Image: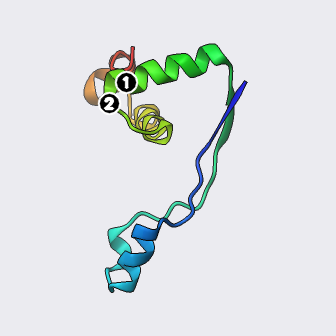
Amino acid sequence: MRTISVNPKKTPKETGAMELGMKQSNRRVKSHIISLRVSNEEWNSLRQIMQGQQFKRVSDLMREAFKMVLTPPSSFGGAEGNRDRFI
């Protein structure tokens, strides 16, 4: 089993941006963590999807999947049509 964890800690780049006086509204604040255990088979499937869609991080793939789930069925050909993007 593998555990996927998304950690919202600030990166040095984000900290530097704040020190330079950039507006806080220019960056998304991420304050929630989702942890998920997946089997080796599920992990391998995620890696294949990431490579096929050119995602660098699992969190990027998960955010895109969340967008698909939250998109109303009438948009973009419906949820079923969106699912085909990753398969």
Secondary structure state at the residue bearing disc 2: loop
Residue 60 rendering spot, x and y as whole percentages: 43, 40
Residue at the left extreme?
Answer: 76
Residue at (36, 73) in percent of width and height: 25
Q: Dot 2: few (<14), some (14–19), or many (≥20) neighbours within 10 Å?
A: few
Q: Dot 1: few (<14), some (14–19), or many (≥20) neighbours within 10 Å?
A: few
- Place residue 3 in its image quadrant: top right
Read off the residue under disc 2: 54
Residue 44 rendering spot, x and y as whole percentages: 54, 17
Residue 41 rendering spot, x and y as whole percentages: 61, 13
Asked whether 77 or 48 is in front, the reply is 48
- Place residue 78 in its image quadrant: top left
Q: Are marks 2 and 1 in contact (CB under 8 Å)?
A: yes
Residue type, label 1: Gln
Q: Quadrant of the N terminus?
A: top right
Specify how the rendered protein is coloured. rainbow
Read off the residue under disc 1: 51
Asked whether 26 or 19 is in front, the reply is 19
Asked whether 45 or 62 is in front, the reply is 45
Residue at (46, 32) in percent of width and height: 69
Residue at (33, 84) in percent of width and height: 20
Residue at the front extreme?
Answer: 12
Between the C-alphas of marks 2 and 1, the distance is 5 Å
Residue type, label 2: Gln
What count of labels does the image hold?
A: 2
For residue 51, above or below residue 57: above
Residue at (45, 41) in percent of width and height: 63
Residue 87 rendering spot, x and y as whole percentages: 39, 13
